[in-house]
Image (cartoon, helix red, strand yellow):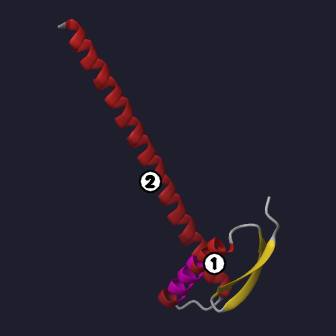
Amino acid sequence: MSAKRSVAIRVLGQEYRIRTDADPAELQRVAGLVDETMSRLRDRTGAVDSLDLAMMAAVNLARDLLSERAGWHAGQATQRVRSLAEQVETLLRSDDLRRT
């Protein structure tokens, strides 16, 4: 287990220090996504209250996450169906060969 360290991030020009054992570069990428999302929402909606922007960003990012997860699960299901279909086809071909 890694030792926790304090990592500085910036969101909407405000610095936050976060104690974490996660990779600091990864945390910076996450903070960059949050900052980008909040900035885009501020520009699009004209909202200036940081709590309002944070809430809208959280909802947008959660929606994106759920959409991504649904796509990933659908992709897994599709791959599983393909795999099963290939197995059935292989079995049918081998059965056809035994009959001839």
Mark before the other along the chain sequence, 1 or 2: 1
Q: Secondary structure at mark 1?
A: helix
Residue 83 percent coordinates (x, y): 37, 34
Q: Position of residue 22 (x, y in %)?
A: 71, 67
Is 38 in the magenta?
yes
Residue located farthest toward the left when viewing the structure as drawn: 100
Quadrant (top left, top right, bottom left, bottom right) of the N terminus: bottom right
Quadrant in the picture for residue 20: bottom right
Q: Looking at this rendering, what residue extends furthest in the right direction?
A: 3
In the image, farthest residue toward the front: 2
Residue sitting at x 58%, y 70%:
59
13 lies above or below 58: below
Residue type at the position of mark 2: Gly
Q: Nearer the viewer, residue 34 or 27?
A: 27
For the residue labelled by badge 2, is the local secondary structure a helix, a strand or a loop?
Answer: helix
Disc marking residue 71: 2
Query: Residue 28 got which mark?
Result: 1
Q: As rendered, which of 68 and 24 lies closer to the eye? A: 24
Query: Residue 11 occupies which quadrant of the picture?
Result: bottom right
Q: Is residue 34 magenta?
A: yes
| Front disc: 1 or 2 | 1
Quadrant of res 8: bottom right
Q: Residue at x 43, y 47 (%)?
A: 74
Marks 1/2: CA–CA distance: 26 Å
The amino acid at mark 1 is Gln
Q: Residue at x 24, y 8 (%)?
A: 98
Instruction: Examine the rendered structure and indicate whether residue 33 appears above or below residue 76.
Output: below
Q: In which quadrant will I find the C terminus?
A: top left
Q: Is residue 98 left or right of residue 7?
A: left
Position of 41 with respect to 58 (left or right) is left
Specify few, some or many for label 2: CA neighbours under 10 Å numbering under 14, 14-19, or 20 or more: few
The residue range painted magenta reads: 33-42
